[in-house]
Image (cartoon, rainbow, N blue to C red):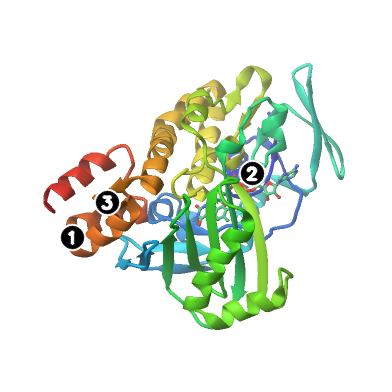
Amino acid sequence: MKVAIVGAGPAGSHLACQLSKHGFDVLLFDARPAWEKPCGGGVTSKALREFEFLRDGQSPKQMISSLRLISAAGRDLTVTPSNEFAIYSRKELAEIMRQRAVAAGAQLRVARVEKTNFSNGHWLLETSVGEFTADFLVGADGASSVIRRRVGVKFDAKDFAYALGWHVRSAEIVSRVDVKYLDDASGYLWLFPRHDHLSYGIASGYQEMPPARLKEKLLAYIETEDPAAAREIRNAEGNTTANTNFYAAILPALDVKTWDGLRACDASKAWALIGDAAGFVDPLTGEGIYYAIKSADLLAEAMKTRVADFDAMWRAEFGAELRRASQLSDRFYYGSFAGARLTERMVQFAKRHRGIREVLRDLVAGEQGYTDLKPRLVRSLATVF
Ligand SMILES: Cc1cc2nc3c(=O)[nH]c(=O)nc-3n(C[C@H](O)[C@H](O)[C@H](O)COP(=O)(O)OP(=O)(O)OC[C@H]3O[C@@H](n4cnc5c(N)ncnc54)[C@H](O)[C@@H]3O)c2cc1C
């Protein structure tokens, strides 16, 4: 069977690799050579444990053993994750993953897929380098997926978050991640160190706060932490310079109702969606790399046996978790407890109580799910009062 995969990010490249290993004839398209996609590049220890190629010594990454959580009021708490996690440059990760796909037998084309048409059981793809045919089409083309729209899966503005930030070149190696909650919006801002630069970013609900205010919030934080970097950014005035690079992007953050109605494949019409194209991102944290790779794994498994099972497979594997994260998201960012914001209290209580610190430590490592989070927190809180 000939499979056309649109998008060679983590989802598309991993699927191309897995299917090629199992004898499928794979065409993998990406509009660009490997690139620095706007992303924190954070990969949880759960993902490192599950996917060996992420752990191997060849992939350049910054290992992280310390995370500073900062409340909107400026209280901070340093958490040591139960296992180290990694920060990747997305360009380097894309290079590694594309090479794996090609080594397994996939044909990689740097080409934009412009139009797709399904007739007589076959797909015709019009691309920037010519036409191709395939028996099955996979949309792995990210948050603004054209394939998702083409196959009729609809997301609204409420199903997205918005992020912006700067990559800043730095000679200093930092092995700590900062996450700071916002005082008047959902989401958070972050400092994620890469092995040769720092990635600063801020994410919130789509259209929840004007980009200019998000920029000012992030710059205010950078100014307190690294005045030299803040000066570089202000001097660059939004332009890319040798030392700074501005980015802005949307990411999926699906609403509960969208999770309930979501279909990521139709075997009778020979299509499937994976990764961001399918909306597989944790709506509370924005983590999507793990779900991109995991959904590719599951789809490869389903295509070897029965494609129609893919929807049941991703729902069982991580769908309930991500739906739960969506349910919790508003309460987490806007909820209050004992007269203050929940995020404020969380940092405050965790500073004093080991049980809550341990829950946070496991959450950060990706080892604590959302569906069983509440009972564990209630047990920990019972020891507080
Ligand atoms: C600011 C920000 C920070 C984030 N931080 C993190 C983080 O720290 N950790 C984490 O786990 N997740 C993070 N995410 C989410 C993560 O980036 C995504 O979930 C992940 O990249 C999804 O992988 P993917 O392969 O599905 O899509 P992508 O990585 O977006 O890849 C899609 C590919 O499709 C290509 N493409 C698009 N359209 C076409 C077309 N028509 N023809 C050909 N090619 C096309 C693109 O060029 C791209 O290479 C973040 C997201 C944002 C926006």
User: Disc 3 marks which residue?
Assistant: 339
User: Disc 1 marks which residue?
Assistant: 354
Instruction: Say which residue appears at 31% left-offset and 37% top-offset.
Output: 371
Q: CA distance from mark 3 to mark 2?
A: 40 Å
| Residue type (three-letter) at the residue carrying disc 3 | Gly
Q: Which mark is residue 13?
A: none
148 with respect to 328 (left or right): right
| Residue type (three-letter) at the residue carrying disc 2 | Gly
| Residue type (three-letter) at the residue carrying disc 1 | Arg
Relative to the observer, which residue lies in front, 289 or 99? 289
Disc 3 versus disc 1: nearer the observer: 3
Q: Which mark is residue 142?
A: 2
From where the camera sits, is residue 117 visible? yes
Q: Counting other residues with Cα less than 10 Å from the Cα at mark 1, is it few (<14), some (14-19), or many (20 or more)?
A: some
Q: CA distance from mark 1 to mark 2?
A: 39 Å
For the residue with label 2, is its CB less than 8 Å from the closest atom of ligand 1? yes
